[in-house]
Image: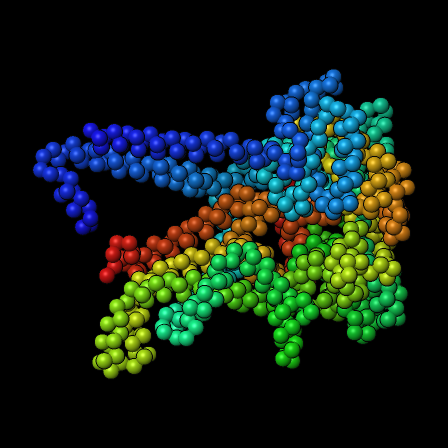
Amino acid sequence: MQRKLFRVLALAMIVMSVLAGCGTQGTTTPAEGNQPVATTKPPEAATTQAPASGGGEKVVIRWWHITTAENQKAVWQKLADEYMAAHPNVTIDITVLENEAFKTKLSTVMQSGDPPDIFQSWGGGTMNEYAKAGLLKDITADLDADGGAWRNTFAAGALGVYSYEGKNYGVPWDMGMVGMWYNKALFAQAGVTPPTTWNELLDVVKKLKAAGITPIAVGAGDKWPAAFWWEYLATRMGGSSAFGAAANRTGSFADPAFVDAGKKLQELIALEPFQDGFLGATWGDEATAIGNGKAAMDLMGQWGPGAFADNSADGKGLGENLGWFPFPMVEGGKGDANDAVGGGNGFAIGKNAPPEAIDFVKYLTRAESQAQCAEVGFCIPVVKGGEAGLKDPLMITIQQSLAKAKYFQLYYDQALTPALGSVVNDSVQGIFAGTLTPEQAAQAIEDSAKQELK
Amino acid sequence: MEITATRRTMKSGGNGQAPHRATDSFTIVLFLLPAFVLFTLFVVYPILRSVYFSQFNWNGLGPAVKYVGLDNFKRILTDKIFMTAMKNGLLIVVLSLTLQLPLSLALAIMVGRDLPGRVFFRTVFFMPYVLSEVITGIIWLGLFNAAPERGFINALLVLVGIQPQTFLGNIHQVLACIFAVLTWKYFGLHMLLFMAGLQGIPKELEEAARIDGANGWQVITHVTIPLLASTIRTSVYLSVVGALTQFNLVWIMTRGGPVNASEVMATYMYRYGFVRLWLGYGSAVALVMLVICLIFSIVYLRLVRQPDYLGSY
């Protein structure tokens, strides 16, 4: 009898513990997905579902951004505080994430179909995938309201990056370009000046090497810094048409422009211009080499100077010795010397975003807001009037160079689907390592494009 | 066997055999249930989902609709990079068995003896195993840095007048570097297993061999190692499965690079499944890995015949 009682008790306990296990599982998972980390605000609970009629009903906006530097994220916080003060019914939950952590976390919530209301986006292929899956909110009507009042404040090229099949799913707040950062002191030491053509660049590389200076730093282990070289060469060789044709499948990534880009790149690689261990190096290693004056040139975006300083021994970087020039023109290329490869940052709007979220993004992209982030130096404004905040002469140079570009090429790994972008990066790394010929690299990308871009 | 038999005789006490057997099986079911439910929920069910997703071209957003049948598997088996990953994995397995385990065994025999300072060395040798793989990876990433002013190993090389090496940035050196770190991290664990095994060997046997005129080496090869057989089998099994599923260290140190030179199956799966967001293809890779590990386990158990838990002596 006693034994039986014991068994029943044991069974009950086991069943309960199993159920309890399942129960906890069921409640914690969504909470983890929803609950922003860096917030002291009350949880949203019922409020997100509430239709926002503006009549003082409580609304919570979930905002994920990746601006982690103290002085920079303070700008976002200040803007959010201002907005909340003016709209007492709105609570803005800010989650600040580091770049890679953001990508991982975002892809998780996207797969569970619950995007944040406002989140960091680079536009292009990745954003298009989300739009295709119905995870983003179409804000075309908001941009076009009042005769396009909001739309017209943006530089058209930058805004276009956040549209897919004619509909807008986000807005830019920063747009920059990749160009050549160089160490003026090392250039002077080798007696060279910034080159304007590819052959001149090869010549500069030879002279720097002769002077015992590492000409170029590249983090080919991270792949994308290496891919910039090939993408720029392809843009110079093929002009505005080559990429467009290959991407919409009227052309091919095995076309001469792309193969020739690889061949030009080989000319450079043959000179062994890179720092030791460049194949395994990260972007951080690359920035360290430049920031400490161990290499003379670096093909990198507008965020370069901040990273050079952060990775230098004294935390200051090159200071006055840092210069910038656009990627040289390639002899015989079809492109224009002013064409730019680059990209920027923006905010995409999640499918469940309340109207207040869009209104808040409008607030974030006012000229005054843009000027504030430009002043702190973490954006090159895309809204007219925002450039008033730019103080750094190098940033002004980039902004002016960008304004001259007739054709703007978004980074390939952003413009294409994530999978194809990663094939581009892998293939270019193969050229850098000498394991792929230019033809093989171009063909590998084309093979993948055939599958991805149907 | 013995235990069950004893229990049965203890319980049965002569009368009512049949009802007791029924409650017996009830108890068995009862005690198996929680493990069975958890196992099904968190192991069997995900595997079945992987089998399902592996037949789709799916990026994880929305439902999987592009059915491709077995195409994913065809692609894996014809993909050169996957072959590189397999080759690297097997190379690590072979090196583990031929270098890492003998080294651990030698050290276990050494520190298992009455040598001065053995406690100290035992602790030191075991320390790397206590570190997490991620931390280990980050530490060695720093040590292997290509610039002599930042990488300790290159600084040493320069000190003794050797050219600094690029290590993790070199297609030909990267795998050796990763294997060195794996050995550094895991020889302590195997050493500990061997030491535990050594303690189970009666001193008398070695003494008897010595009295019969065997020298130190003969004692080790003819007495110690044969008696350690079951521990060695466990060690080999852990080592092989660990090598086949290695991910953390490789991903932290090289991400499978440069140009796939240090790719292993798990990094391949992660790269394609989660970086490229081909979740269907990634599922297929995971299944291929599962099958490889399963085949190894079955073949291995067959080869060594009696698994230890059934009593191999």
Residue A228 lies left or right of residue B174; in this view the side is right
**Residue in front for this viewpoint, A223 or B56:** A223
User: Looking at the image, which residue is at 86% across and 32% down?
Assistant: A152
**Picture colour scheme:** rainbow
Quarter of the image where the C terminus of chain A is located: top right
**Residue in front for this viewpoint, A60 or B43:** A60
Q: Would residue A117 be visible to someone looking at this image?
A: no
User: Looking at the image, which residue is at 66% across and 38% down?
Assistant: A38
Q: Where is residue B176 drawn, in percent x and y?
A: 54, 68
Q: Would residue A366 be visible to someone looking at this image?
A: yes
**Residue in front for this viewpoint, A187 or A13:** A13
Task: Give the vertical position of A218 relative to A68 (above or below).
Answer: below
Residue A204 lies left or right of residue A352; in this view the side is right
User: Looking at the image, which residue is at 43% across and 40% down?
Assistant: B42
**Residue in front for this viewpoint, B175 or A63:** A63
Q: Where is residue A190 drawn, in percent x and y?
A: 85, 71
